[in-house]
Image: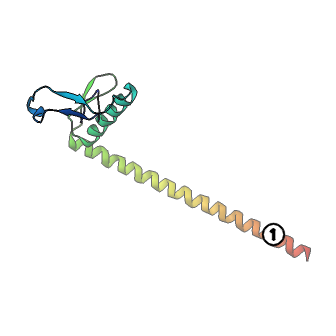
Amino acid sequence: MGSRQNPGRRYYACVDAMHGGCGFLEWHDDPLPKFLSDLIGDLRDEVRRLRGESSVGVFEDDSAVVALPEAQRGREVVALEDQLREKNTELDALKAKYQNVVFLFLVFVVGLVTAKMLLQS
């Protein structure tokens, strides 16, 4: 299990280590470089924050921020979904315009090729 300083690092401990145990602890894995252990810890914190497991998030400046209430988070999700639908509608309109331009260009090219073939005959 590890800790913030030793994320995912396996160790040996007394059978009853969770309830005090005998104090025996020996690391099974070599320590990770500081950059990797910090990165894993930050990623774990972000996953917990996104899952809503903690009511307080800690950011890079070490300031504690209270998590949004579930109802407010739900409203924000709905608002973001609405924005996504609007953007998808805009994309569909742009895609239709692009397809029309490509179709007209192809018709123009086919017309030129046909005209050239007819004039050469």
Q: Using a 10 Å C-alpha cutoff, classify the residue at mark 1 as few (fewer than 14 neighbours), some (14 to 19) or many (20 or more).
A: few
Query: Which residue is rendered at x = 38% and y = 27% of the image?
Result: 33
Position of residue 61 measured from the top left corner of the image (x, y, whole percent): 33, 22
The foreground one among 7 and 113 is 7
Query: Which residue is rendered at x = 21% and y = 39% of the image?
Result: 53
The foreground one among 68 and 60 is 60
Position of residue 6 measured from the top left corner of the image (x, y, whole percent): 29, 29
Query: Which residue is rendered at x = 31% and y = 46% of the image?
Result: 77
Query: Which residue is rendered at x = 23% and y = 40% of the image?
Result: 52
Judging from the image, what secondary structure is the residue with disc 1 in? helix
On the image, numbered disc 1 is attached to which residue? 113
Quadrant assignment for the C terminus? bottom right
Q: Is residue 121 above or below residue 73?
A: below
The foreground one among 69 and 4 is 4
Position of residue 84 measured from the top left corner of the image (x, y, whole percent): 41, 50
Position of residue 71 measured from the top left corner of the image (x, y, whole percent): 21, 44
Outermost residue toward the right in this view? 120
Q: Is residue 90 above or below residue 105?
A: above
Query: Is 74 positioned to the left or the right of 119 in the image?
Result: left
Quadrant assignment for the N terminus? top left
Disc 1 marks which amino acid? Val
